[in-house]
Amino acid sequence: MANDTIMNAMDAIYGGLAECFITIEGRRYNFMNMTEFESKWDVNITDVPVLGKVGMGHKSSGGKGTWSGTAHYNQSVFRELADNYQKTGYMPYFEIQVSNEDPSSAVGRQTIIHRGCLCDSFTLAKFQAGEEILDEELSGTFESWDLPEKFKQLNGFVTN
């Protein structure tokens, strides 16, 4: 084998130990009812014609943050935002903080704080006969993010 440095299976992160906090107008909520969350930063790529080249060049030109998740249907915080918005036209930005830390992993803790978040849709009311547990899909956008805590690099990860 050319490279005998391999990842220890214990260094995979167990997702059920994550934390999720949402801060809306100074009030912080422990969103322990979230069962799934993902955020993405999509980079806009612009085609750049270059004289003397057959192929097209490319340049990054901005980005857009999106988030989505699934939560148990047992909170009204986002419904209150929707209610206030439909009555007043005001929807405040909020923050979503997600931390991943698995004590069995050598990588430690990573935290991402999503800033300038908005919801793009709201589940207002819901039922399903015969369903044991109700959940709801949440999604939206964010304008920027910070990385105050980063995973440590595993031994063997950097090769030069």
Image (spheres, rainbow, N blue to C red):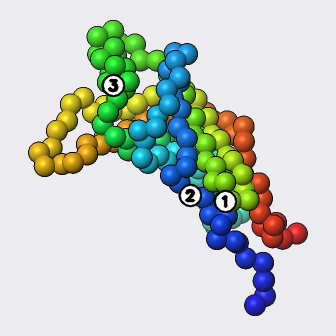
Q: Which residue is mark 3?
A: 76
Q: Which residue is mark 2?
A: 14
Q: Position of residue 112 (x, y in %)?
A: 63, 40
Q: Position of residue 53 (x, y in %)?
A: 69, 64
Circle number at residue 104? 1
Task: Characterize the local packing of mark 1: few (<14), some (14-19) or many (20 or more) Cα atoms within 10 angstroms.
Answer: few
Left or right of 142? Residue 148 is right
The three-letter amino acid code for the residue at tag 3 is Ser
The three-letter amino acid code for the residue at tag 2 is Tyr
Kindly report the distance in space between the C-alpha atoms of the residues bearing marks 1 and 2: 9 Å
- Dot 3: element: loop
Q: Is residue 1 visible?
A: yes
Task: Characterize the local packing of mark 3: few (<14), some (14-19) or many (20 or more) Cα atoms within 10 angstroms.
Answer: few
Q: Is residue 49 visible?
A: no
Nearer mark to the viewer, of 1 and 2: 1
Q: Nearer the viewer, residue 73 or 141?
A: 73
Do the numbered discs 3 and 1 sit on residues whose CB atoms are within 8 Å?
no
Do the numbered discs 1 and 2 sit on residues whose CB atoms are within 8 Å?
yes
- Dot 1: element: loop
Q: Please, which residue is most extreme toward the left here?
A: 129
Q: Residue at x 37, y 26 (%)?
A: 78
The three-letter amino acid code for the residue at tag 1 is Ser
